[in-house]
Amino acid sequence: MNIQSTVFAETGTNDSLYDDLALHTEFSDLADPNGFNLVAQDWLIGVADVVDSTSEIAAGRYKTVNMVGAAVISAVINTLTPKSFPFVFSGDGAGFAVWPGARDQVAAALTAVQAWSRREFGIRLRVALVPVCDAMQAGRSLRIARYRPAPGVDYAMFAGGGLTWAEEQMKAGRYTLPAAPEDIVPDLTGLSCRWSNLQARHGSILSVVVVPGTKGSETDFADLTRSILQLGNTLDRGGHPVPVQGPEVQYPPPGIRLEAQASHGKRSVLRRKVELLAQNLFAWVLFRTGSRLGQFDPEHYRAEVASNVDFRKFDDGLKMTLDCDADTRGRIKTLLASAQDRGLVRYGLYEQDEALVTCFVPSPMQNDHIHFIDGAGGGYTQAAAHIKTG
């Protein structure tokens, strides 16, 4: 079935077109493929993923893997600010789209994160920039929509298969970028991982990845995703894994060493850790006492964290991180297994006890801070691996 989407750019010269897209405030509306806009063929798809993330998970380093994936988005945001662009976090990597005039800046940001990841954590990161026109020639498209879960923040949703195709090409060694100098330091201002992991309150944290199968139309897939979302909506707050009052605050923060290693720049990791400990002690006192500091209200900020997280997304398929009871998990699995038998979808589910949050906070005084959530035991990466293994 051909979906007649609005072409959101005839050419890539207009770098403000993402801002011009309509904002969806009901997530279920995004199951309709007609709500997505076709990206112009001269734009670029950016993709990045951690090599052999399964082994990193087995070594207990999934929080580090998440940090590296979020760092890709952080570096590109800081490079292109104040201009906006569509992006999505995938747990062990990221995907996005940019206008052609941003190519050199974005390539430099990607390779800087690649060098930084290898130097600081010993993690190999693939990165690539793929022309949208090449994906189109391969029979894929890149379609996007904007979803606003709360005032001040929105996330891009992707459809059409272009992002997935670009990742496949990257993994095959195509569209790679020249390596950056080993000592380069990417601009990761705002990247942090200070919140405690979130314990499941209703059973387990369920990571869900659903992608189109080899049979059926986009309308069939849309109908199925609506059914999945309806099941999710029977859960408390739709399965939202973050309490309404926000995550818990600990001192010292559990991710302090990781954040220090990620953000020390030319300073020593120890010096940066001491700086962060001092900053976080002050913040911890504010959160513990509920005391305001000027315009900063700690209780309001924590609640914004809960409202701003990306626990549901469309990323050439449906991904969700749900606080899920056993009965609902069983119903979701039954629905998906039946659809997979009919060739409508392929899917992966993965259960764990906790979720983790990685954040990008330009300023705690504003409400545009974004928070990427994933299962703490491997999350989307493990769920996707279950698709590959059947």
Image: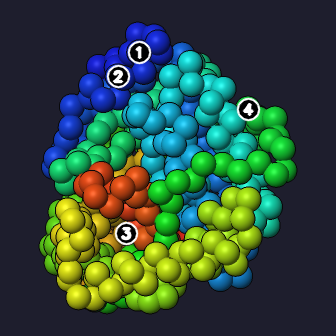
Marks 1 and 3 sit apart, C-alpha to C-alpha, by 34 Å
- Image quarter (top left, top right, bottom left or bottom right) of the C terminus: bottom right
Amino acid at dot 3 = Thr
Q: Does residue 66 sit above or below 134 in this rendering? A: below
| Residue 79 rendering spot, x and y as whole percentages | 55, 37
Q: Secondary structure at mark 1?
A: loop
Amino acid at dot 1 = Asn
Whether residue 191 is visible here, answered yes or no, is yes
Answer with mark 1 or mark 4, whichever residue precedes in sequence: 1
- The 10 Å Cα crowd at callout 1, few under 14, some 14 to 19, many 20 or more, is few
Q: Secondary structure at mark 4?
A: loop
Whether residue 3 is visible here, answered yes or no, is no
Answer with mark 3 or mark 2, whichever residue precedes in sequence: 2
Amino acid at dot 4 = Tyr
> Which residue is label 1 attached to?
14
Whether residues under marks 2 and 1 lie with C-beta atoms below 8 angstroms apart, the answer is: yes
> Which residue is label 2 attached to?
17
> Which residue is label 4 attached to?
175
